[in-house]
Image: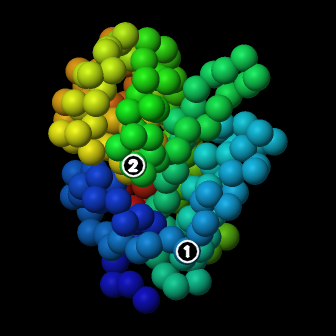
Amino acid sequence: MTDTNLVLASTSRWRAELLARLELPFTCAAPRFDERGEDHRFAQLGPQAFALHLARGKAQSLAADHDAWILAADQLAVLDEPGGPQLLHKPGTSARAVEQLMRLRGRTHQLVTAVVLTRGAVEHHEIDQQHLTMRAFSLVEAQDYVTKHQPLDSVGAYHIEDAGIRLFERIEGGDFTSIMGLPLLVVCRLLRLAEVL
């Protein structure tokens, strides 16, 4: 059991730092949910429903362990291709990060973030979308960025919080915190519904 009324279903330091801005007590817990094991459902569900499916899975994996509101989020990077939307993953290696950046170079992609707040049989959720257009940067620029900042844990192979912002031409969306993985405007709305905020 937890001694707070809010559990963040994440081990991401970025999400924890964002949630801390709201000045509410919370604890963090690692979800027991295999996101990559669900990838086969992306084509069937589409980006929004798939992101919600993953966020819900994370939250539900912790429900039995905590008598508290559980806040979970999942972010997808999606690139429109002729055959339909393509799901991008955390690159994991520098070579794959550079390859992914070059694939996104000069193009617009979406970050789709689903947020779920649940306790018992009650669930509140919302989805946020951001449209990001990258500049036509050079291979050397992409390589230098990856070498210096190692964005291997980000679905887009960049961090907007560091020099990654230099790779962009335009960002369209209502909440810049969504790009970092936890849209705080959405989170605030859900916490108010739950009377936590």
Percent coordinates x, y for residue 71 in the rendering: 47, 61
Q: Residue at x 37, y 66 (%)?
A: 11
Which quarter of the figure is the N terminus placed in?
bottom left
Amino acid type, label 2 = Thr
Kind of element beneath mark 2: loop
Residue on which the image places disc 1 = 32
Which residue is at the front of the view, 95 or 63?
Answer: 95
Residue on which the image places disc 2 = 93
Q: CA distance from mark 1 to mark 2?
A: 24 Å
Percent coordinates x, y for residue 64 in the rendering: 58, 83
Kind of element beneath mark 1: loop
Picture layout, residue 138 above or below residue 22: above
Work out whether mark 1 precedes mark 2 in sequence or the reverse, and give the earlier one: 1
Percent coordinates x, y for residue 174 in the rendering: 40, 25
Query: Is disc 2 surrounded by few (<14), some (14 to 19) or many (20+) residues within 10 Å?
Result: some
Callout 1 touching callout 2 (CB < 8 Å): no
- To which quarter of the image does residue 151 belong? top left
- Answer whether residue 80 is visible to the viewer in this image: yes
Query: Is disc 1 surrounded by few (<14), some (14 to 19) or many (20+) residues within 10 Å?
Result: few
Q: Residue at x 67, y 70 (%)?
A: 121
Which residue is at the front of the view, 59 or 153?
Answer: 153
Percent coordinates x, y for residue 84 in the rendering: 73, 25
